Amino acid sequence: MRKIFTFAFLMGIFGLFTTNLFAQQDATIDPANIRYWIGEGENEVTFIVNWAEPDTALAWGYRFEGESVTIKDVMDGIAAVDSRFSYDSPNGSWLNDIFFNNGVLDLKLTEPMWVSYLVNGESSWNTFDVQTLVDGDYVKWGDTYCGTLIDPENYIYVWEKEVAAVYPLGEEATIDPSEILYWVGQGENEIIFAVNWNEPNRCLAWGYRFDGDQKILKEVMDDIAAADSRFSYVQGDWGVDDIVFEEGELHYSLAGQWWLYNVNGMMGLNGYDAEPLVDGTFVKWGDESCATEIAPWTYVWEQEVEPVWVPTSVMESAMSLSVYPNPAVNETFVTIENAGMNTVSVYDMQGRMVSTMSMTAMEGEQVRVSTETLNAGVYFISVSSDSAVRTAKLVVK
């Protein structure tokens, strides 16, 4: 096993000259620039690690109550919350390695060097499970391979690499297609389209169906806007300037400085008028002011996603849809008016879809709709095709 030394056992006796060198050359970070704080309490310490290959320095913030915490307490607290960070300490006192892996960076100790730590730029006598930190301290572990050797005789290193703040983890909130209430379009392929606004922080989602290999994001937005008069967007010189949802007293609009979109939780790389979407895609626009920034220009929206309800105009419009028998007991039959692919859906009075099916039908064909599992009450039954949406009230006894 590689033996890992700390500065405590190498350099504790070398006086003010060495201390001043540390303080002058060791790179740190202002706590005001920390992005990821872990723990609760009024006291704060900054935790930094400097790796080699590539030369990378990352910093977390740690909050706590009480007079002090050990370095090991801080590291255990970070490891418990941030799955990207871990360390190897076989006996709990000596440290073999510190890891960070976010899927792009894979950082670890570079053989055959060793890691050491500084507290506020100075060496320590203690192992990391004993060394305490108080409010305002910073601690930095460093890989000697990328350190500056300022005292070769006594193996004294500092790390001058600029320290970057670790961005917090974020999990993009999504929704299962089975929960979507309002579907636009026809076809075998399905996309979920969602928008997250601020003031208030709310996220609404539509479903979109299509045939073919893919749809461009702008086409999806245009089709939703054509079908749902509550939804609209403003196209600007550099993309989308605003996305609006209005119904009654509800008015959601841009509150931040810019809009971004994610595709399956990853930042879209194309303009929205060129972004291709395929079957099963989840796309979400978001206002950066209510997002979690997990990397430069990379945001996630953690607000719970709600299915947008079926518009009142659709629910209340009866366009000569033939439904018989009505009232229904165990079943009813709907007459298809447009040949081709049709979707027959039943909604309750709250706008929740309670059943749906899609089929290719002939003009005038009658399609059976089971009502056996529905409670007695008033429903809306809707038949949508490429050319029209027809809706009628359905009473179930």
Image (tube, rainbow, N blue to C red):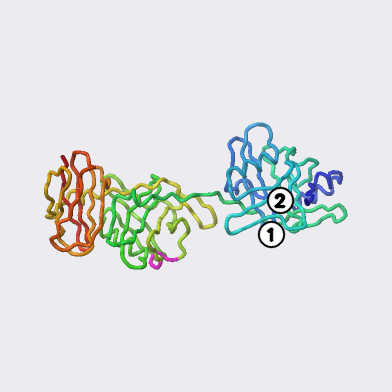
Q: Nearer the viewer, residue 392 or 45?
A: 392
Name the spot of residue 140 as percent of width and height, x first.
Answer: 71, 48
**Label for residue 101?**
none
- State the residue at coordinates (21%, 43%): 372
| Residue at disc 1, secondary structure | loop
Seen in the picture, residue 296 relative to 370 is either above or below; the reply is below
Seen in the picture, residue 10 relative to 217 is either above or below; the reply is above
| Residue at disc 2, secondary structure | strand
Of badges 1 and 2, nearer the viewer stands 2
Name the spot of residue 84 as percent of width and height, x first.
Answer: 60, 50
The image quarter containing residue 218 is: bottom left
Q: Is residue 331 magenta?
A: no
Q: Residues within 10 Å of mark 2 (few under 14, many from 20)?
A: some
Q: Main secondary structure of the magenta part?
A: loop
Name the spot of residue 10 as percent of width and height, x first.
Answer: 84, 47
Q: Residues within 10 Å of mark 1 (few under 14, many from 20)?
A: some
For marks 1 and 2, the one nearer the N-term is: 1
The residue carrying mark 2 is 97
Q: Marks 1/2: CA distance?
A: 15 Å
Which stretch is magenta? 270-274
Q: Nearer the viewer, residue 278 or 225?
A: 278
The image quarter containing residue 263 is: bottom left
- State the residue at coordinates (45%, 47%): 302
From the viewer's perspective, is 111 left or right of 297? right
Q: Is residue 272 magenta?
A: yes
**Label for residue 55?**
1
Instruction: Tell me whether the residue at label 1 lies in contact with that at label 2, contact meaning CB atoms closer than 8 angstroms.
Output: no
